Image (tube, rainbow, N blue to C red):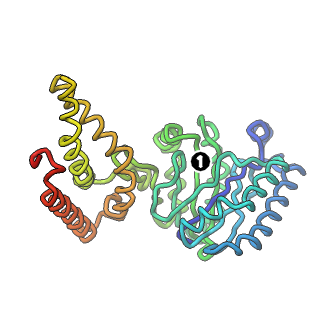
Amino acid sequence: MPDVKVVLLINPASEDEIARMRRNGSAQLFDERLAGRKEKAARLSQRLDGTAAQFPGCLDVNLSTYDNPLLAWALVVGFESATAARHWETSRELEDIREELASSGMAMPRPPILIEEDHTPPAGVAVFTNSVAKNHVGPFVDYMSRVVIAACHEFQGFLGGTLIQSPIDPTQWLSVLVYEDEQHLSSWLNSDERANLLPRLRSYLTDDFTTVTGRSPFGAVVRVVGGRAESSPAWKIILLVVMVLFPTVTPILRFLNPVLQDLSLPPGVISVVGMLIATSFVTVLWMPPVSRLFDRWIDPVRGRSLRVSVIGALVVVGVFAIEIGFFAAFPGLTPWGA
């Protein structure tokens, strides 16, 4: 599969239509209107296949559709890099597709979803990698659409779910679940309903599924492995936090504290204000890009090996040395050299 995908999630039916179809049973799932929408989506995919190739870095275009409107459809465009994908996301072609879908009664419940291999998906999105046994592809698709996605619809904030088959290996699938936000997604991931569905789902797979579901405020990767949540090792996150905290706190102590002291503020208030500012810088500005830079090292699965852990730790120690050397060379930036 390409390293980067832009997924245009399409709901072939409204929530009211889906509710009515579920009440009436699977025999009435596809009426003429839905069949027409499917043909429209297929034509859009063909047109997109012809035009998206004009964009640098575009690799392929696929349409994910199945005969069950509980499973959202998706136009999937593969790119060789995130930069190429983001360039296409701002194109007029994409806006035209969005307008045509809306005029045909098909809605895109959210902006395009950018999926990068081994990177955290957007908030509210879970991407599962599934290796399906060759003789179980049909039952896997049926179970996901008829049972798993149907159960997802019972949870508040669910926007849609789709299955993406690899154009190279028909046994490799991505299942994408989309919720309004992380809180609604977590409600599903931690639910008893989902836990009860996993044993049968695993029976169709050759390997247990994995996914990256999000990050903690300090950048730790939260990955679901075989239905169990695993997070980045605490010692790695501590090293990264200290790595960005040290060069943040040092100039704050040098320049901000004297200003606060001139205001005759109590020492406790000065300390609290300094810590609030430093912590805000670390959590909001520094840790997101730093954690992405060290993404593989802090990943609870990809960074588990001793070799990766040691190499990453040596890099962090090297950064510490650079920081200490910098402040030693410019003592005027430090409270102890003022």
Q: Residue at x 74, y 52 (%)?
A: 68
* Residue type highlighted by circle 1: Val
Q: Quadrant of residue 5?
A: bottom right
Residue 247 screen position, x and y as percent: 23, 51
Q: Nearer the viewer, residue 43 or 32?
A: 43
Label 1 sits on a secondary structure element that is strand
Q: Looking at this rendering, what residue extends furthest in the right direction? A: 32
Establish if 268 lies above or below 2: above
Is 244 placed left or right of 26 in the picture?
left
Residue 233 vs 275, above or below: the answer is below
Residue 1 showing in the rendered view:
no
Query: Where does the image place residue 310, in percent across and percent down from the top left?
Result: 21, 67
Q: Which residue corresponds to the image point at 79% horizontal and 52% vertical from the top-left?
A: 99
Residue 270: image quadrant is top left
Instruction: Tell which of 250 and 227 is nearer to you.
Output: 250
**Residue tagged by mark 1?**
178
Q: Nearer the viewer, residue 316 or 169?
A: 316
Q: Is residue 134 left or right of residue 315?
A: right
Q: How many marks?
A: 1
Q: Quadrant of the N terminus?
A: bottom right
Eyeballing the image, is 226 above or below 311? Answer: above
Q: Is residue 301 left or right of residue 165?
A: left
What's the residue at 41%, 55% (across, down)? 225
Residue 221, percent across and down? 38, 53
Q: Position of residue 238 (x, y in %)?
A: 23, 50
